Amino acid sequence: MRKTVLSVDSVNCRRAHGKGIHNYMEETLRVGVITSTHGVRGEVKVFPTTDDPERFKTLKKVLLDTGKELLPMEIQQVRFFKNMVILKFKGFDNINDIEIYKGKDLLITRDQAVKLGPDENFIVDLIGLSVVSDEGEDLGTLTDVLLTGANDVYEVTMPHGKKLLLPAIRQCILNVDLDEGKVLVHVLDGLMDL
């Protein structure tokens, strides 16, 4: 089974690639989103967008995407509450300092990313790749990765606008070549009929 590693959500990937622009999204990976403040001492609740929220324990710095710039933020304290990560940043000591960043992304640089295993890719690297069948047919562009639990599903937008859903399993996804910008696939019987 192929594994796709979270770090940047597909909405941001589509935004970055859909405009045909090369920006920091390709060199940074999203690990979380600030959802709200926590208490009055400058802590924030972060929804993790990484496969392993425990990785926040080892992160020393993140980049806060304000929408206009990337602010380096030094992590002072990490706690966990239910499905959220509670972070305290150095220099932010009250609720007023930090609440303006609600809804903002926390990013890391590629050198801070987890090491990928064989057949693992970051979602941001897959979005925008051309998808070609093992029969040589250009199927379209990989536009989303759906995380279903059992296995990931690659959404391909075909030239006529129809969506093709391909399970990320070895029988279907034959090769991912990031350098060439292509995904070679075998379309299983019945998938084109859906």
Image (tube, grey):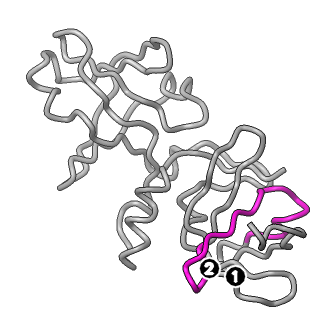
* Mark 1 touches mark 2? (CB < 8 Å): yes
The image quarter in which residue 28 lies: bottom left
Where in the figure is residue 75, as x and y percent of width and height?
Answer: 34, 26
Quadrant housing residue 159:
bottom right
Sequence-wise, the earlier of marks 1 and 2 is: 1
**Nearer the observer, 30 or 193:** 193
* Helix, strand or loop under label 2: loop
Query: Is 193 placed left or right of 90 in the picture?
Result: right
The image shows residue 144, relative to residue 8, as above or below, that is: below
Question: Is 111 on the left or on the right of 137, as rendered?
Answer: left
**Residue assigned mark 1:** 139
Segment colored magenta: 157-176
Q: Residue at x 69, y 78 (%)?
A: 131
Q: Amino acid at mark 1?
A: Leu
Q: Is residue 167 magenta?
A: yes
Instruction: State the residue at coordinates (28%, 22%).
Output: 44
Q: Position of residue 81 (x, y in %)?
A: 45, 11
Q: Pick whichever, 41 or 111, lies toward us.
A: 41
Residue position marked by numbered label 2 in the rendering: 158
